[in-house]
Image: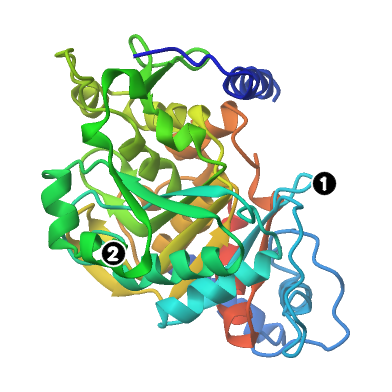
Amino acid sequence: MRTPNTSNSINRRQLLRMAGTLGGLAALSSFLEACSKAGLDLTSASSTSTAPTGATLPATSAAKLQNELTSTLPAESAPVQYTTTPTSTETGYSKVAFVKTGNRTEGVHKAIDLLKTNPVAGKNVFIKPNFNSADPTPGSTHPDVLTALVLKLKEMGAVKITVGDRSGMGDTHQVMGDLGIFDLAEKLGFDLVILDDLTQEDWVMFTPVDSHWKSGFPFASPCLEAGSLVQTCCLKTHRYGGQFTLSLKNSVGMVAKKIPSHNYDFMNELHTSRHQRRMIAEINTAYTPNLIVLDGVEAFISGGPDNGQKVSSQVILAGTDRIAIDAVGVALLRYHGCQTEVAKGKIFEQEQIARAVELGLGVDSPTKIQLLPADQESAAYAEDINYILSQG
């Protein structure tokens, strides 16, 4: 077990500490009815729309928002021009690709293309999936999502791809075997790392500023040493205290349960603490993802993380900002009828998100999230989600 000893790790933590010191459906139905009475058209968009500003949806600006969303639609014949520009821009806005689809393969490719950034070319890439258990999606990462992601990253120039995780509900070897991941790795040519098998020296201790962890947490060094870290998560609630498990919560799988030759159980500390949701956010200070892909083709709106009330939510998201992704994810859960703690209060007051904002991990307001819809159908869906986001 070691403390971060590279300049990149130290600088990242220092910057995060500096940043941390700065700084439902019924309502939607009523809103749409009011817009209809006011003569606002929510089913079509003007061809003379203005450039997107990332603004939320005031009650008097429904048509304007739809124009803004539509203006971000990609031209059908335009080739994708990748850049190295991050999707959290200098202006403070975070872009989230939004693809309405039931086809995971198509959705993953479209969502990544919408971001028009390539963080993997020429790099060794580590993919962190959701292999918490061997339950079907959204209990775990769908094989179609992992396949599409691996092939897309190779197409984008990734030199080497490693997939790794630590299961929280069951033996990781067994979980990956049951999900067919060993066969998939052989078929697609990526490496697999079982994080439970790491040695003591492969864990790096982190203690965020004003941490709710007693003595910090051990984070897997293979994730830190990769040239690019890509995360793929599911859309679901969490009945064991996390309340929702999206990109922030997916990071828990990169933390050790126990370090070899030590008996201390870090996962017991996490899951028995009244500060659990804040501690989840604090884990995310250890790294910055280069790409996040959220599979929301199906979702759990209660229960979770392994099983629960499933709905067809028909969306794939992509971005680089965990706060933005999770805020949109919470809005989606509310839109699809979630009635758990996730449905209460303002989205940015949810403890995972609020603590992540304090730590400077992404945007600090829903007004700084810019949805990038793939097409007209996606734009209409995104408009509804943006309205929920606009409530805070």
Q: Is residue 337 left or right of residue 272?
A: right
Q: Is residue 50 left or right of residue 297?
A: right
Q: Position of residue 328 (x, y in %)?
A: 52, 57
Seen at 45% across and 61% down, the residue is: 294
Instruction: Locate residue 60: give its quadrant.
Output: bottom right
Q: Secondary structure at mark 2?
A: helix
Distance from the alpha carbon under mark 2 to that under mark 1 = 43 Å
Q: Amino acid at mark 2?
A: Glu
Instruction: Locate residue 253: give its quadrant.
Output: top left
Up/down of 331 relative to 249, above or below: below
Q: Is residue 371 left or right of residue 91?
A: left
Q: Position of residue 238 (x, y in %)?
A: 26, 48
Q: Secondary structure at mark 1?
A: loop
| Quarter in which the N terminus is drawn | top left
Total numbered labels: 2
Q: Amino acid at mark 1?
A: Thr
- CB contact under 8 Å: marks 2 and 1: no
Instruction: Locate residue 388: give its quadrant.
Output: bottom right
Of callouts 2 and 1, the N-terminal one: 1
Seen at 22% across and 59% down, the residue is: 182
Q: Position of residue 23 (x, y in %)?
A: 69, 25
Residue under pointer 2: 186
Pick the front one: 98 or 343: 98
Q: Position of residue 161 (x, y in %)?
A: 45, 54
Q: Give the class, few, some or many, for how many residues have Cα within 10 Å of label 1's Cα (few <14, many ≥20).
A: few
Circle number at residue 91: 1
Seen at 58% across and 33% down, the residue is: 357
| Residue 284 appears in view | yes
Up/down of 181 relative to 162, above or below: below
Pick the front one: 80 or 207: 80
Q: Is residue 303 left or right of residue 327?
A: left
